[in-house]
Amino acid sequence: MRLELFRKGNTEHEKQAAELLREAFPQAYGEGPEEEVHSILEEERIAVKAVLKGELVGLIGAIPQYGYTGWELHPLVVRKDLRGRGIGGKLVSLLEEKVAEGGGVTLYLGTDDENGATSLSEGDLFQDPFRKMAEIRNYKGHPYEFYQKMGYIIIGVIPDANGIGKPDIWMAKSLVR
């Protein structure tokens, strides 16, 4: 497998990226993931792809925020049949390296819980959110634990961001420590 910066111009990989997004996030990209791929490949952003036997099997992107010191990790996707093999971790690590090279000091992300995958989907998160974040439990393989293994910490939640009982979990990592 090869990891490299993802730039505009490889139309086959752009099509494969759109299909990966559609498959992994049908609620967000079921219609028109090609537009998201074009956004990911904008000049000011950083995108990295994983290629196996000429085929794009994963991608990750980052959006500059706060000038170029804070960056939002968005999106991360690995082909379903290859998940759990370390590709996502390698993509995250290379993206962190590239963001840091460009002056980034913090990388953050939102990871939605739209289907009751964590204990944060239970009850009213407006009541004692910090205790609930500290006591979070994973019920259905929610990716927040993957990000924790990569050194990210939960820094907040947006209660009901995706509807009642469907929070967005915010995580971040310092790139300078």
Image (tube, rainbow, N blue to C red):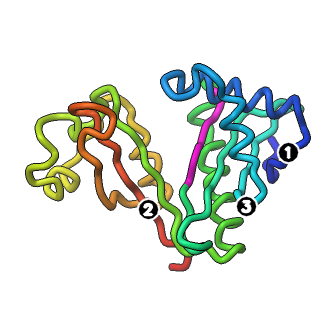
> Which numbered disc, 3 or 2, marks the residue closer to the eye?
3
CA gap, disc 3 and disc 1: 12 Å
Residue 2 location (% of width, % of height): 82, 45
User: Are discs 3 and 1 less than 8 Å apart at CB?
Assistant: no
SS assignment at label 1:
loop
Q: Which residue is drawn at 46% across and 61% down?
A: 151
User: Are discs 3 and 2 less than 8 Å apart at CB?
Assistant: no
- Image disc number at residue 44: 3
Chain-order first, disc 3 or disc 1: 1
Horizontal arrangement in the rendering, residue 97 relative to residue 153 (left or right):
right
Residue 132 location (% of width, % of height): 16, 50
Regarding residue 91, the answer to whether it shows in the image is yes
Disc 2: which residue: 172
Residue 156 occupies which quadrant of the picture?
bottom left
Q: Which residue is drawn at 79% across and 49% down?
A: 3
CA gap, disc 3 and disc 2: 21 Å
